[in-house]
Image: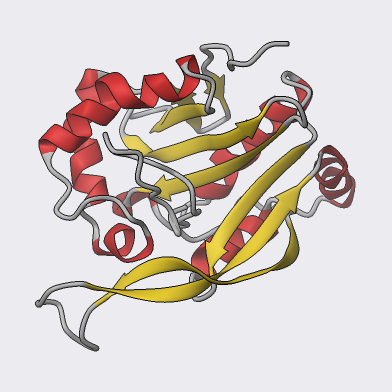
Amino acid sequence: MTTTFPDVTISTDRLVLRPFEGEDVNALAEMMNDEHVIAWTSAPHPYTRADAHAWATVDSHAERTEGRGIVFAVTEFLTQRLVGIVHLKNTNWRTRSTEVGYVTAPWARGEGYASESVLAVAQWLFDDQRFERLELRTAADNTASQQVAQKIGCISEGVLRNAWLVRTRPENGTEGSWTETRTDLIVWSLLPEDIEDMADSDGYNGQDDYGYGRGAQAGASGYAVGADWS
């Protein structure tokens, strides 16, 4: 039984999803220090250049080679700028299921990139890798990530109560330390037939806000970043 994903690049009309490279370090560090990423993920804060270097050059690649999943650096086709991350993790090779997390850079939000990149990975996962289930978990208050899940055809399955930590700071405050608060997680799933049904109904319109899906990682210690980054 195959227990690692192939080293691949996925392309859409606007995006190229590829392995991380050393040249991504500066853009990755900038993206991970955005306040929305800080709030919804468990990535280190501040996210240092050393954290970014470890992720881009070693740790993201180990996710694939050690069989846990695969990490894609999402880049804009025309400019090669780093748009975000899509990360498959918690892969179960026996049941052919995995979990997705994602992050979108501040400058790239509102362009539909999150939905486009996650949907491209899902189609590759189902068509080429013969997987049967993709799972996404979003923090209860992370409406942007929930919109991404809905737009790619995910089905809400239920709630994991008090299952995640988000970061907050004083209302209307841009200064001050972040504190952690417990929150529920909404569990979503996507199956091969869900994508087929969406294609038949022309349900995907290519528009979304940024998302943070729980489970994406971007650091040397394996902390989940994502949406709960997505």
Q: Nearer the viewer, residue 165 or 121?
A: 165
Q: Nearer the viewer, residue 76 or 167?
A: 167
Instruction: Tell me where residue 83 appears, x and y as whole percent.
Output: 37, 40
Residue 33 appears left or right of 1:
left
Instruction: Tell me where residue 56 appears, x and y as whole percent.
Output: 28, 26
Q: Nearer the viewer, residue 208 or 195?
A: 195
Instruction: Tell me where residue 213 appears, x and y as whole percent.
Output: 50, 53
User: At x 89% / y 45%, what residue is drawn?
Assistant: 200
Q: Is residue 161 above or below residue 228?
A: below
Q: Is residue 42 above or below residue 130?
A: below
User: At x 10% / y 77%, what residue is drawn?
Assistant: 176
Q: Can I make out residue 83 in this image?
A: yes
Quadrant containing the N terminus is top right
Residue 100 appears left or right of 30:
right
Residue reaching furthest to the bottom: 171
Q: Can I make out residue 113 in this image?
A: no
User: At x 20% / y 86%, what residue is drawn?
Assistant: 170
Q: Nearer the viewer, residue 227 or 223?
A: 223
Instruction: Tell me where residue 128 appears, x and y as whole percent.
Output: 73, 18
User: At x 37% / y 49%, what residue is drawn?
Assistant: 108
